[in-house]
Amino acid sequence: MSEFEDDYSDLEVEIEQSDEPEVAELPTPVDWMGLSIHEWGEEIGRLRLWVARIVTEWALPSSVVLPCWEQHGALVQLLGSMRDSYDTLYHEMQPGTGSVDWQRYWAWGRSELASLTGAMRCTATEHRADKLQEWARSIAEEGEASEYAIAEDSRVEMAVRNHLNKGRTGAPMNVVFVDFSKDR
């Protein structure tokens, strides 16, 4: 054994891995429109706690967050996205600027909430359901089987036929269809 081998013999000892906790993954945003009714019920409960805290912390009036916010899809979506942003920007993996970014998003969010709330017919003591366009409600609830979806499909088919016929006869066409699948 050489004189240098003794100096480095301790390097051969296996270095133990530290048992530091793993860093949690960044939270994923909630897709409110993709949730089942059961998932929605669970998620709205979690969101309700966050909304109550933010309304209390910021002393928000009902002109910004209505007491019936849970009954308005647009408010659920916006408040949910604000909570998702908060959770992400205050995550341990974020840099120190995460809190400043949250303040920017929250300033925008409060403005959007006030705008949405102002357009609703609810008051601090009375809820009024959103006025939904019948065609959209029907398609959202019934899908392709909706009478509105079927009627729209028929109109589209007729428009395409008319367009093709005009193209064959050389008549002026009001709509331009571009087929991006063809090679140029």
Image (cartoon, rainbow, N blue to C red):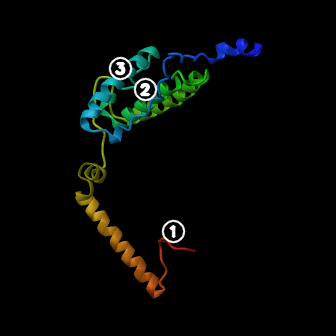
Rounded to the nearest angstrom, the CA distance separating label 2 from label 3 is 17 Å
Mark 1 residue crowding within 10 angstroms, few (<14) / some (14–19) / many (20+): few
- Whole-percent x, y for residue 137 in the image: 28, 49
The spot of residue 54 in percent (x, y) is: 43, 19
Mark 1 touching mark 2, by CB under 8 A?
Answer: no
Q: Which residue is mark 2?
A: 64
Identify whether 170 is placed above or below 14: below
- The residue shown at (23%, 59%) is 147
State whether residue 156 appears in this view: yes
In the current view of this chain or complex, which residue is farthest to the bottom?
169
Mark closer to the chain start, 2 or 3: 3
Q: Which numbered mark, 2 or 3, is in the foreground of this view?
A: 3
Q: Which residue is mark 1?
A: 180
Amino acid type at circle 1 is: Phe
Q: State the residue position of label 3.
A: 49
Quadrant (top left, top right, bottom left, bottom right) of the C terminus: bottom right
Q: Secondary structure at mark 1?
A: loop
Q: CA distance from mark 1 to mark 2?
A: 45 Å
Most extreme residue toward the front is 1
Q: Compare marks 1 and 2 and give the one earlier in the sequence.
A: 2
Q: Is residue 134 left or right of residue 1?
A: left
Mark 2 residue type: Val
Q: CA distance from mark 1 to mark 3?
A: 48 Å
Q: Is residue 9 left or right of residue 183?
A: right
What residue do we see at 32% from left, 68% from top? 155
Between 135 and 37, the one nearer to me in the picture: 37
